[in-house]
Image (spheres, rainbow, N blue to C red):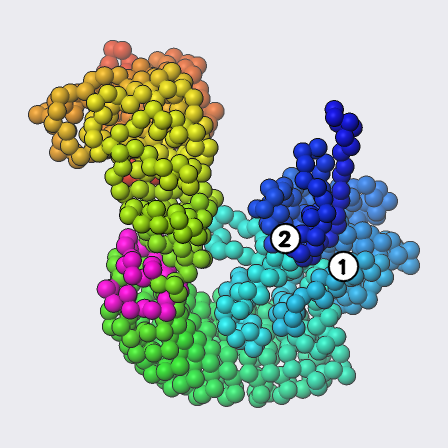
Amino acid sequence: MSNQGQLKYLVIIDDIWQCGEWEIIRKSLPENNLGSRIVTTTPMNVIANKWRDDFGALIHPMYPKWKDYANSWDYLINYKDVCASMIAMKADMVEKGLDDDHPVMRMCGGVPLALLCMLSAVAREVEQMESAGDALRTFAAKVDRNGIQNVRGFEPLVESLQLGYDNLPHIMLKTCLLYCSIYPKNHYFERDDLVKRWITQGFVYKEETGKYYFDELLNRGLILHIELLPFVRGLKYMIHPMMRNFLRAKSRECNFFVCISDIAWPCSNRTRWLYIGNGSRTGELDEVDAGIDWSHIRSLVDFGGEERVPLEKRVPLEKLERLRVLDIQFGMFSYLRNHHLNHICGLRRLRHLYALLGIRITEIPPEIGSLQYLESLDFSQTSVTQLPSEIGGLKRLKTLDVSYNNCLEELPREIAELENLETLRMKSTRITELPKEIGRLKKLKTLDASDSKRIKELPREIIVGLHELENLNLTGTGIKELPLESVELRHLKRLLLKDTKVEKVAREILRRKELKNLELGGVVGALPWEAARLSELEGVPKCVRQAWNNTEVMSELARETLSFRNTPSGGGGLVVGTKHMHIPRWIREHFNSLNSLDIRICKLREEDIAFLGEMPNLQNLTLRFEVVPKEPVAISSGGFPKLDWLNIDSRVPRVAFQQGAMPGLKTIKFFFQFYSGPPYTEPLGIKHLSNLYYISFQYNPDWYRADSPCIRATIDAVRKEAQEHPGKISFYVTGHKTEIFPEFKIEQLPELTHDTSTSATRKCLTGLSTEPKRAIFLENNGARVYEEINEASTSETGEIEEDSTHISQVNSEASTSGTCEIEADNKA
């Protein structure tokens, strides 16, 4: 009962599959503030996200995540595997050797329902055998061989998985899911790679459709995202072990993609789609080879094997006379050799040749030109130095991928003869220039030269000819600018220029309705305002998206010069290039949720400061004063709950921080180009910024001279305040070494020769010893100092002097990020 005598209810609604179902339920429940709660479950991420966005619901993901670096399944809730706790309670099973790390239990993949079914099935198996150890050893193989559909005890799990499978909207989506069962256990893949193979097999015809299918399966939890080590690039995915087991058995039922070790004798002559798992051994292959009719195979996928059996002993290439698709996924250290390609070039009906991985492949034979039906050719990650001129004879070729070939330095001119080529990928090669002949590929839609760092230019002749180009990926190249002819790319959908030196893109390109995504160079601090409308551009602030969908707001912003910063969190920032007398009204009404604001302003009133202080997410604020304030801008206590970065662009830094102002501020930067007025030496109140640790002055160094006392006096006044600050301050001036305040003295520091650990650093800073010192390591909120001092100091006071004993302190000032590092070059 509540204080008002009203009942509070807990309503639990399990397993909602459609948004419409929730709408019906919601309309039947009154909205009030009596404290009742509704708990629902759903297998659909899109439904959960809708509840969160529309009603502010709290979302608790319940599916497990595979952590490859830990080799374990973990729940997102508290990152703990629930199954481990459940197994620990089964004392009788634990005594028989069944713990959470046992292979039988790891098949459950952290899913409680799978675990309960597994325990039930294992209990039956143990009852039938005298030895529990023997039962556990044979049970996993039994489940893997027969499928959970044919093992007693798994009925509830099979029913659940069957429901998810049957609920898929159409047959081709089911086919794409069934194809995923060919991947070995705990084998991860990338989205684009899987979509490419779906297209190769003929399950989908367009890349956009394949990506839609993938997202649909991911949204339903049928494909899982896995967590890898931080240095592994790109998102990786996999199939849950139980889902893989379920799909593998279902694929055998309909004689779809069948593993060579699972082929039954009556079905051997009807098999058209075949894959060789990475667990297949030579003996198994020889036994199956005796009964299979290889001439009927249309598609073959080979994942290699534990014994690294050469290709000619695994597959009788001479018998694959009707083969259409050959997909070899041995890995770059496979046993493929040049002579294997000679055999493959004899498969005259081959249409798709994928993943000829292997560093031992050094050349492509001229016979490749005899594959007149070839539509896809992929020989990534090889040691090929050049492509044969005969490749120009592949008139039907639509996709050519030569990525990750570290020995490939050029493409042949005959590539211009590939009149039907639609996709050309040369990612991460040693190619130095793009041949102008690429411009003759009239049907080319995708050009990917990413991470080929030696490419410095995009020839205008290429752009002029590629009228159908949709995807241009130049990420990680040395290109500095796009040719003017780029505005003629009227079908361009994705323009990827990340980690290049390209800073500007013609606004005519950004205004095209076809463009969906844009990535500019890493040095770009903001994107043009027009880019915010791109549907696939990630990190666009939510309020900016809303503004683009609001006709009245866009009309109000028509005369503004705007750009924005995109961030992974989506909070983002706004850069206002138009000069304003005060904070404009439209910022107050539509953009108060930003985490970054950069604005040109003539005067900052009290109400403006109050508004900025009330912005709940503001972390980075840049104020560019067009007029020098007559009186210092007073920043009082209160407000600015998350602000940790303040930039002030003004000819004179006339601000005054009062007691308690900006409590979280850590970094403050002053920018100005010139100033020739009277010196400004009034205190800024730096001491009141309790968490401040970095102060920077950035300007034209020519103005910091002996004959410019106005500037020197201003900086010296702020330096004096920094010296008196109660905390540790890093103080930087353009062109000078970073100073650390307060200055440390030798007698305050303990001896530290090589230990740079955190504990040793703390001893340095707390002065636990007064012994003579030889080396000092200091760390102060992002600023690092490493100095060496002679045993005999020349200073009577024992202060660290700037002489030959001082190892060079090199300041690295990041102009946009605001980080400050002091590096040392150990010359002791």
Residue 406 percent location from the top left of the image: 38, 65
Q: Using the image, determine if residue 579 lies above or below residue 463.
A: above
Residue 179 percent location from the top left of the image: 63, 70
SS category of the residue bearing label 2: helix
Decide which of tag 2 and tag 1 comes sooner along the chain.
Answer: 2
Question: 179 and 602: which one is in front?
Answer: 602
Left of 166 or right of it: where is 347? left
Residue 476 in view of the camera: no
Residue at point 78%, 27% (across, down) = 5
Residue marked by disc 2: 47
Gap in angstroms between the C-alphas marked 2 and 1: 19 Å
Q: Quadrant of residue 414?
A: bottom left
Residue 614 percent location from the top left of the image: 43, 29
Q: Looking at the picture, which amino acid does disc 2 mark? A: Ile
Q: Looking at the picture, which amino acid does disc 1 mark? A: Ser
Residue at point 68%, 79% (across, down) = 286
Q: Quadrant of residue 240?
A: bottom right
Q: What stretch is highlighted in magenta?
A: 483-511
**Mark 1: few, some, or many residues within 10 Å (few <14, many ≥20)?**
few
Residue marked by disc 1: 160
